[in-house]
Image (cartoon, rainbow, N blue to C red):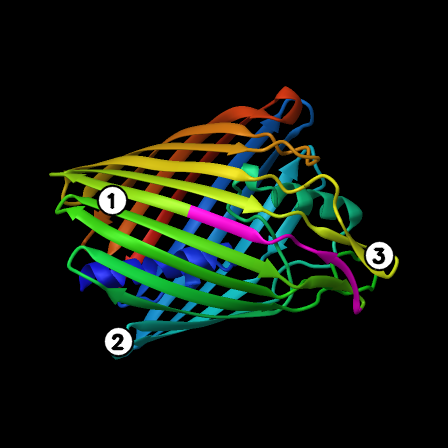
Amino acid sequence: MRMFFRFLFAVLLLQSIALGQGEQLVFQRSGFASVMPVYQRWTASDTSTFSQTAMTLSVSVPLGRSWSASLRTIAAGVSGDVASLKGAGDTQIGLSYNLTEYNIILNASANLPSGKEKLTSGEFETSVLISKHVFDLYVPNFGQGAGVTLGGIWGIQLSEKLVLGLGASYAYLGAYTPLEQYDDKYDPGEEFLISGGMEYRASKSLDLSCDIIFTTYGRDKLEDEEIFGAGNKFVVNAQLTKHFDEDELWIFLLYRSRAKSQYAVGESFVTEANQFMPNQFELRSHYEHRFTPTLTGRALVSGELSSETADRYSGARIFGLGLAADIVLDGAITIAPVTKYSFGTLKDDVKVDGLMGGVGISWSF
């Protein structure tokens, strides 16, 4: 049964990430609160250097045996050889309900528009830059208007070793004003997501899992006029977790593919001739060693490869190395420092390197 619920939580987390809502959708059986200050800096050989300092606050509170409520809010600042952009981000609140007898977990979350909108042209250019997936910034956007996400997952344990699950989500994204010099409201299209996954316990020390996620989008509007249709997104990932006494090896592989988008031309929509959004392959891995009951260390390895498109930040060949730790204090408070160095190239052999450092502090209750 423990394996079964762990699998359901993992698939819900992947659904929430795909919808851009973060971890607040996951059902929590115990409460926690955490803060995470993070500093990230990137340099590109053909452009300039920029950095982001961010702070995230997350809280999750169980409400009885079946309900769980959560909140997540952020603040960040971007500076360097780009237009400065700083302020609060949007706030997400969530509610989860666990239908144990039916093997179903239901989720509802709302995006509250507390983030910075009505950007100057320079700030808007900075916001586009930090949204690029290749930089993997802790806060990739600030204000995106009000929104609601509804989702759920059903799972079935076929045996002591095998669990299967199916999920679906719907996201409504409200209109907002992205530029201060224009009053026009931009209304992102709705998002529909379906997912399926499995987890297989090959042995007492080896777990394998795989998930498939498909997302389709409604058309974006500007002042009630349809202007853009994002291409469908397909994601497949696989995980391996191997335990060795006090050690653990974890490997996560992900492939993300986007179909061509459509643009309004007159009264009709035309599919882009050359795909702009690149397809991506990602690797995340760590080797963990438990030094003492209160100290765990991890060596981190990551990589990202993307296809080359018209996007200047495509064609990525990025690799990362890092260190992280969990330091447990009195059984309830955990301090989690992390640092990582990334390097590689983008399209046209542009060299990039990045540095990340942060310290998470969490309290379980």
Q: Residue 331 location, x and y as percent?
A: 18, 55
Q: Which residue is tagged 3? A: 181
Q: Residue at x 38, y 38 (%)?
A: 284
Image disc number at residue 128: none
Nearer-the-camera pick, 202 or 365: 202
Q: Are marks 2 and 1 in contact (CB under 8 Å)?
A: no
Question: 58 and 314: which one is in front?
Answer: 314
Q: Dot 3: what SS?
A: loop
Q: Label 2, label 3: how many angstroms apart (C-alpha)?
A: 51 Å
- Residue 111: quarter of image: bottom right
From which residue to which does the magenta span run? 224-236
Q: Secondary structure at mark 2?
A: helix
- The reply to whether callout 2 and callout 3 are in contact (CB within 8 Å) is no
Q: Can you tell which quarter of the image residue 301 is in? A: top left
Give the residue at x 60% y 52%: 141
- For marks 2 and 3, give the one nearer the viewer: 2
Say which amino acid is labelled 3.
Gln
Which residue matches tag 1?
Answer: 327
Q: Give the overall secondary structure of the magenta segment.
A: strand
Q: Amino acid at mark 2?
A: Thr
* Residue 99, quarter of the rendered image: bottom left
The residue under the point 66% across, 54% down is: 230
Secondary structure of the residue carrying tag 1 is strand
Q: Is residue 314 left or right of residue 92?
A: right
Q: Which residue appears at 60% of the width and 65% of the height?
A: 114
Amino acid residing under circle 1: Ile
Residue 322, how many percent across, how many down?
A: 37, 31
Q: Is residue 232 magenta?
A: yes
**Where does residue 316 sit, x and y in percent of width and height?**
56, 30
